[in-house]
Amino acid sequence: MEKKKKGEKRKMVIGIDVGGTKTALGLFDENRRLVAERRGASDPALPPEAFFDGLIEEIKLLADQGGAALSQVRGVGLGMPSFILFEKGHIVKTSNLVKLRDFPARAYLADRLGVPVVLDNDSHAAALAEHRSGAGRGHENMVYCAVSTGISSGFIIGGKLFRGSYGWAGESGHMIVTPDEGILCGCGNRGCLMSWCSGSMIVKHIRKWLEEGETSLMTELAGGAARIDCSHLEAAYDGGDALAARALSQMARYLGIWFFNLYSALNINCFVLGGGLLNMGEKLLLPVRREFDRYNRSEMPVYFKEAELKDRFGIIGAAELFSHEHLLR
Ligand SMILES: [Zn+2]
């Protein structure tokens, strides 16, 4: 650990967003201003020690870039697409980075950096970011919903992030909606919500329909059924394609059910929606809202808002993870 200079205060916070393919790091000053930023690839082939050793090097480079010593850093917040035992800072498993499993990541990093580390799920980080500085500002209770390749959420209850007993509150994309029916999801179950409507799963449904003899513009747009992704789905929908319309309506149906179930369980009236699929805008959101309203029997207002923090929400949220924990203690 570097020596702390006399009179030097620990003011900076580092936020790190580890994604399935990319990692981003941000150095923030005491006014939450971003002073330095780095981006790199996440290598899924690396075992945990090598992965985190690489991250430590990146953290040092980031501090250098921002003209700061590690001794000026109050703490590091790290958001990951993982199941994390929060109290222990232990990674149970990670989507897309399958080698990052069963690893005491917080202790590993904190010991080597000499700086406190807070490690949490990336949806929790995003929920904190949107609550503190984005679309959830001013809402005592809020659900952040990530709709992308996968589906997950983060709950803010009474102004605080709710983690649950072990740390994975918000993994609501794996709630079962059609028991044992449908496509097998990475969670190990059939019939979970995201198996019907996430970006990667809807493409599997489309391929299945094509194998069953349906036809679609998407095949031509993508240059073959195997290459279809959500961009082709949207383009085909805009071109009046019937199969794309069927896919979109299936997504809207299950997303509407998801929001209604969360609303029923928690009675939180502010949903902040983030993630790549929302680029589809109203063509997805209007039918989702219609589905929600079909089930909702109350007249009380329910707000659906688009996430406001764009591509930097990951590092902002990760830094917020540290600040949130620090404020609570
Ligand atoms: Zn699942």
Image: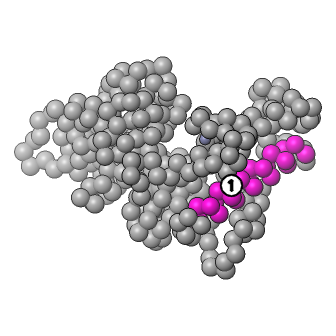
Residue 15 is drawn in which quadrant? top left
Residue sitting nearer the eye, 87 or 233: 87
Asked whether 188 falls inside the magenta stretch, the response is: no
- Residue at image location 48% in from the left, 34% down from the top: 94
- Up-down: is 197 above or below 213? below
How far from the left and from the top, in percent, is residue 105?
A: 33, 33
Q: Which residues are magenta?
A: 242-263
Asked whether 243 falls inside the magenta stretch, the response is: yes
Residue type at numbered disc 1: Leu
Magenta segment, prevailing SS (helix, strand or loop)? helix
**Residue 231 appears left or right of 66:** right
- Residue at image location 58% in from the left, 61% down from the top: 262
Which quarter is ligand 1 in? top right
Task: Tell me the quarter of the image containing the C terminus.
Answer: bottom left
How far from the left and from the top, in percent, is residue 214?
A: 92, 35
Residue 95 visible at all:
yes
Residue sitting nearer the eye, 268 or 241: 268
- Residue at image location 35% in from the left, 45% down from the top: 86
Q: Circle 1 sits on which residue?
A: 255
Task: Tell me the quarter of the image containing the N terminus.
Answer: top left
- Up-down: is 133 above or below 91? below
Residue sitting nearer the eye, 236 or 149: 149
Residue 279 visible at all:
no
Q: How is the image coloured?
A: one colour
Q: Neighbour class for label 1 at 10 Å: few (<14), some, many (≥20)?
A: many
How far from the left and from the top, in percent, is residue 159?
A: 40, 66
Residue sitting nearer the eye, 109 or 258: 258
How far from the left and from the top, in percent, is residue 158?
A: 41, 69
**Residue 303 appears left or right of 154:** right
**Residue 58 appears left or right of 3:** right
